[in-house]
Amino acid sequence: MKNMDIAIDASRAIRSRKTGVEWYACKLIEALAKIAPPGWRVDLIVDNSPPPSLRVRGGREGLVPSFNFSLPPQWSITSLRWPPRYLWSQVRLAAHLQITRPNLFFSPVHVLPFLATAPAVVTIHDVDYVTHPEAYSAKGRAYLKLTTRFAVRRAVRVLVPSEATRQGLIKYFGASPEKIAVTPLAPIITDIPPASEVAAVKKKLGIEWPYFLFLGRLETKKNAVRVIEAFKKIQPALGETRLLLVGRPGRGYEAVRSAIKNAGLGDRIFELGWRSAEEVTTLLTGATALVFPSLAEGFGLPILDAFAVGTPVITSASIATEEVAGGAAVLVDPFSTDEIADAMKSLAENHAPAVELAAKGREWVKNFSWEKTARQTLAVFQEII
């Protein structure tokens, strides 16, 4: 195998507070490190000084706690400092790629530098800013449309996590179907935590069973307001059952806060903010169900994480989440508060269907792994170089 220089935008992978895209970048890089050909020199490019534990260079193996894996000897990390808050990809990264001229550049975060000339592969996670413009600022929509349009045209190949995103790129951006490869993601969670760990997290956070879990940004697109309204409808019939909201505020958070206040349920609704992967794992393990009726998603990682720990899932029909759930979840119309409420009440009151759904989820999630995602990604790289 001849030597190849591969550059990867790893800026999202070293974020300390990871959500979907950050976890994708991190887990994919970890899996690629295990299977990449030995002749490939891979440079992981980050946008700030990584933590001291991350400062490993090619020629040495070292544990990378932020990634939680060892880098092969021929892999390196390059930090490109950029004091301005914006345009790191379009200025600092672009200049670096012009100088180093790798055989291939991979961006797992949808943005390609306008001025970079290396053959490129890009992952575009969704087109939600087109289908649900109300969930984004005007500036955000304009930037996402511009960079997506450029990436679709400029990249040699485009990776997407779902067929739904693939169809969106074809419909809204005129992407060539042959250019797009669907590379589904995989669960972040791999092991069910022991009962003692679950109990410790419950005590730390001050929560009690039973509870429903909402996981995602508290924003319009994630449909948090309707989840709160649905819970308000059914809570009187469910006694001590609570609703836990796990995620940081997003666009539309004010409406979420108003919905919590208007529900008038006091400590029956807990807003827990962003939580670590370990805490999310234990919260999912103890939940009556994950309530995930997003208005739009490019994939829906929490669905697979819930399946991995045997927790039933309520999610949206007719978008990528239905594709990801594979018939192992309760599907609802995300615009119907009544449907969401009925699904929650049914799983809380009927043990047998909940157990059956959990079993289906555990079986379905076996179809997904980061090694599989990495091999599909590597195959695309090899087609190009």
Image (spheres, grey):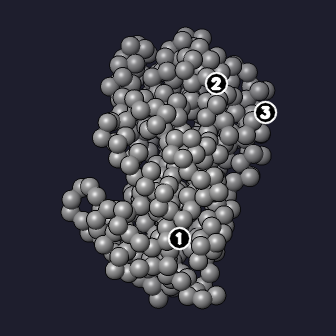
- Mark nearest the camera among 3 and 2 is 2
> Identity of the amino acid at label 2?
Val
Q: Secondary structure at mark 2?
A: strand
Mark 3 residue crowding within 10 angstroms, few (<14) / some (14–19) / many (20+): few
Residue at numbered disc 1 = 69
Rendered position, 135 above or below 157: above
**Which residue lies at the image location 64% right of the left edge and 87% below the top edge?**
1
Q: Secondary structure at mark 1?
A: strand
Q: Would residue 264 appear left or right of 290 to someone viewing this image? A: left
The secondary structure type at the circle numbered 3 is: helix
Figure quadrant of residue 356:
top right
Look at mark 3 in the image and give the residue it sits on: 356
Residue ID at (45%, 73%): 118
> In the image, which is nearer the foreground, mark 2 or mark 1?
2
Q: Residue at x 75, y 45 (%)?
A: 364
Q: Residue 169's x, y, as percent?
A: 55, 46
Nearest to N terminus: mark 2 or mark 1:
1
CA distance for labels 3 and 1: 35 Å
Tally the marks: 3
Residue type, mark 3 in image: Glu
Q: Quadrant of residue 9?
A: bottom left
Disc 3 to disc 2, C-alpha distance: 18 Å
Say what amino acid the circle numbered 1 marks: Phe
- The x and y percentages for residue 298 are 55, 43
- Asked whether, in this view, residue 250 is left or right of residue 316, the answer is left
- Discs 3, 1 touching: Cβ within 8 Å: no
Q: Quadrant of the C terminus?
A: bottom right
Q: Pointer 2: what residue?
A: 332
